[in-house]
Image (cartoon, rainbow, N blue to C red):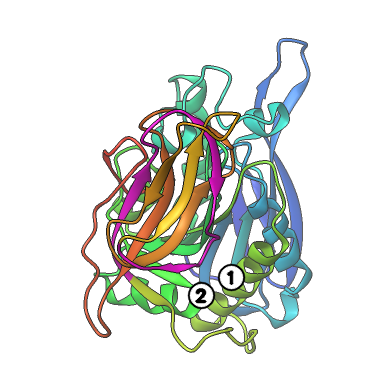
Amino acid sequence: MAKVSNLPIEVAGVFVNPGERRRIEIPVAKLPTGTSLTLPIMVVNGAKPGPTVWISAAVHGDEVNGVEIIGRVLEKIAPRELAGCLITVPIVNVFGFNAQSRYLPDRRDLNRSFPGLERGSVAARLAFLFMQEVVLKCQYGIDLHTGSNHRTNLPQIRANLHDEETRRFSEAFGAPVIMHAGAIDGSLRKAATDAGIRTLVYEAGEPLRFDDEAIQLGRDGVLRVLQALGMRATAPRPRTKHSALIAKTSWVRAFNSGILRLDVKLGAKVSAGQQLGMVADAFGDDAAPLIAAEEGIVIGHTNNPLVQQGEAVVHLATMAPDGSEATLPEVDPEGRPVVEP
């Protein structure tokens, strides 16, 4: 399996020559109606030698920001100017995307199903296909995500920052914050890392909504990574000189059930003891404040005003001192260690 560009690259039996851009539709399955379902892929094989990189989106079918990011990246990529090969997959979970659902028809999470099985469940088969036809042909990967379940995320990079090369192109992306995160079993990033492929995850925005600022930052970040890998001569300038490094994260939870009135926005810096919002009943009675336990920055929050007792409402991050290493793991809304969306 060739990993050197400036040679024809083969995807699903289709060869893409140097200097060529080609769309490929890989058969995935047939729906109960008999309609064929395919995995759409755009391969841009540069005229000059360089690494092979994949960019994926909609591993969770309702996370649409990444779909638009890939479209905007492709507008800027010309095969004659590209060094290396770019394999883009804007809609990995084609089942969930068509149903506007995070999951697959069997209710499995595709991002807990990698590296997959050739003859396993729907999720396992799709994961296996994606690994074989895309991931294992590459040396680097960028997986694009958003928040889940009515939550929105501040643009952020999650990657293995203990690996020097991964950290280099994670910082090149230029997201407002970056965090070190080990990879959880079943995730695309874990499967790719186990195969020796350096991978980062970009998280920004919310499901089923375009966030133009997050999309623009994502597009620019991808182009900066391609430049850092020597695949492009130019890239947009980052908005800030350095990304902030996250040392740890925590969730602020609702003390009671009710209607949320949030007082903070994504990216807001908060101090210990600051009120972040209020949860009360429909009349404004029985109000309980949401209080930050320590100083930090808001990297995520729910957009659903109806919350339950104990529900994770605001995601706070503590910044690491300059020059220090990040010390996750982070925890999910249920308080369990988690490292992937």
Q: Earlier in the sequence, mark 1 or mark 2?
A: 2
Question: Depth check: 271 or 103 in front?
Answer: 271
In the rendered structure, the answer to whether residue 28 lies left or right of residue 123 reads right
Question: Depth check: 229 or 259 in front?
Answer: 259
* Mark carried by residue 52: none
Q: Is residue 213 visible?
A: yes
Image coordinates for residue 247, horizontal then vertical, percent: 26, 67
In the rendered structure, the answer to whether residue 201 lies left or right of residue 184 reads right
Q: Which residue is mark 1?
A: 222
Looking at the rendered structure, the kind of residue marked 1 is Val
Image coordinates for residue 111, horizontal then vertical, percent: 45, 38
Measure the alpha-carbon separation of dots 1 and 2.
Answer: 6 Å
Q: Classify mark 1: helix, strand or loop.
A: helix
Q: Classify mark 2: helix, strand or loop.
A: helix
The residue carrying pointer 2 sits among few (fewer than 14), some (14 to 19) or many (20 or more) residues within 10 Å by Cα, namely many
Q: Residue at x 52, y 17 (%)?
A: 106
Question: Depth check: 229 or 85 in front?
Answer: 229
Establish if 36 lies above or below 318: above
Rendering quarter of residue 37: top right
* Quadrant (top left/top right/bottom left/bottom right) for the N terminus: bottom left
* Quadrant (top left/top right/bottom left/bottom right) for the C terminus: top left
Q: Which residue is mark 2?
A: 173
Tell me the magenta residue range: 246-272
Q: Residue at x 48, y 38 (%)?
A: 279
Looking at the rendered structure, the kind of residue marked 2 is Phe
Rendering quarter of residue 164: bottom left
| Residue 252 sits inside the magenta stretch | yes
